[in-house]
Image (cartoon, rainbow, N blue to C red):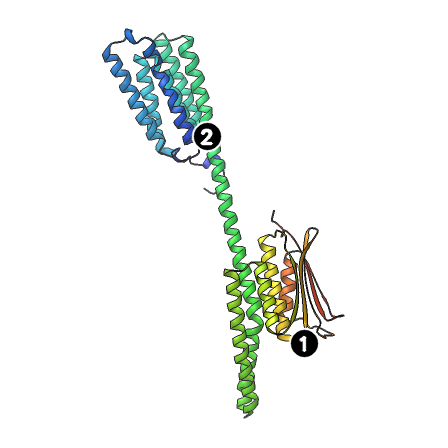
Amino acid sequence: MSSLDITNYTAPAIKNSPAEKWNLISALFTLFYFFTLYANWGEYSSAFKVFAFVVYAAYMAVYFYTLRVSGNDAVVPVAALLAIAVVGTCFYSGSYILYSYAAFFAGYYFKRNHAIAFLALTVACLLIAATLLELWHWYFMGPALLLTVGLFLFGRFSLQEAFHDYVKTQQSEKLEQLAAIAERERIARDMHDLLGHSLSSLALKSELADKLIAKQKIEQAQEEIRQVAELSRATLSEIRAAITGLKLEGLAGVVDTLSQQLKQQGFDVKQTVELPALSAKVESALIFLCKSWVTNILQHSSANTVALTLQAEGESIVLSIQDDGKVTNITPGNGISGMRARVKALAGEMTLDTHHGVKVSITLPLLAQGEV
């Protein structure tokens, strides 16, 4: 189906659907079929009674079968229900109730125009039966027409309800697909930001070592190769940490882990974290931003103290990381550029201050654009 249009929608089987319980309950009302027979029990022969029970049994067998079919497969059983009702009416006036359930199934399974045509056919059969069998009595025509039209409308309502559930399911699946795509894009950005600078450095240092060897500057080449090995190990550790974060840690866990890493490297860490409810996009971005900046501190900072603050301010979440290192100027590299791009994508703000150490301040909306 190319669009969510009920005219192209194929009604599912009623069995195991929300409408099933109502149909099982309404099936109990078919027992009114026996009301006339019971009220006039002594006036009917045994053969007639057996025939009445056979008609009812055949009708109910087709009825329960019809609950299990869908779409065009319902045409034959619905027509069979109407045929049984017509045959029953020729012998027994209590069969009027059987018309209504055929109308219900037509209303549910058939396309709009076909359903209306079948309803007209059902009413026509009732009127013809009333004329030929002289059943123009209120206790026959009144309930027969009321139930037939009423259950037909209920069938259309049940179809609308099934279609509404289908639309919700389709929209939910679409959102899940979009979320999966967004998550893949996020992971791709994380890996690009994580590996881009490191791999570029590895390539440059390897080329430099090769040139130094060609010029017989062995000691300098060995130093470059040693740095390549250290950078490779550091990159591998970052990849493992990123994968671990993807598998296990939320934002709070990431902040605790980063604080421990700073402490292990001799930094005095002051941590203030007050987390409100965050959207998935914002939490994912904050995890990346925290990791990126703390990695920058571990690799380049000469500070002794690091203060990490993460708390809500109005409709925003503010991340602040400040150290007491002495830096007068910061040259943005791939890491900082990647952070700015991530913040901009969420309509946030990022500032750097080097007046008293180094401080990065990031403000993001609690809900990413497009989320509710």
350 with respect to 207 (left or right): right
Number of numbered tags placed on the structure image? 2
Can residue 105 be spotted in the picture?
no
Along the line of sight, the residue nearer the viewer: 15 or 111: 15
Position of 157 relative to 308 (above/below): above
Q: Residue at x 61, y 60 (%)?
A: 286
Return the x and y of residue 334 as percentages of the image width and height: 62, 70
Report helix, strand or loop for mark 1. loop
Q: Position of residue 364 (x, y in %)?
A: 66, 56
Residue at image mark 2: 158
Which numbered disc, 2 or 1, marks the residue that appears first in the sequence?
2
Q: Amino acid at mark 1?
A: Ser
Q: Quadrant of the N terminus?
A: top left
Pick out the residue farthest to the bottom.
Answer: 216
The secondary structure type at the circle numbered 2 is helix
Residue 137 visible in rendering: yes
Residue 361 percent across, percent down from the top left? 70, 62
Q: Gap between marks 2 and 1, in whole Å?
A: 70 Å
Give left or right: position of 328 versus 62: right
Label 2 Cα neighbours within 10 Å, binned few <14 / some 14-19 / many ≥20: many
Pick the residue in front: 106 or 294. Answer: 294
Residue lying at 56% horizontally and 63% vertically, measured from the top left: 189
Mark 1 — residue? 302
Hey, what amino acid is under mark 2? Ser
Q: Position of residue 121 (x, y in %)?
A: 39, 20
Residue 211 appears left or right of 305? left
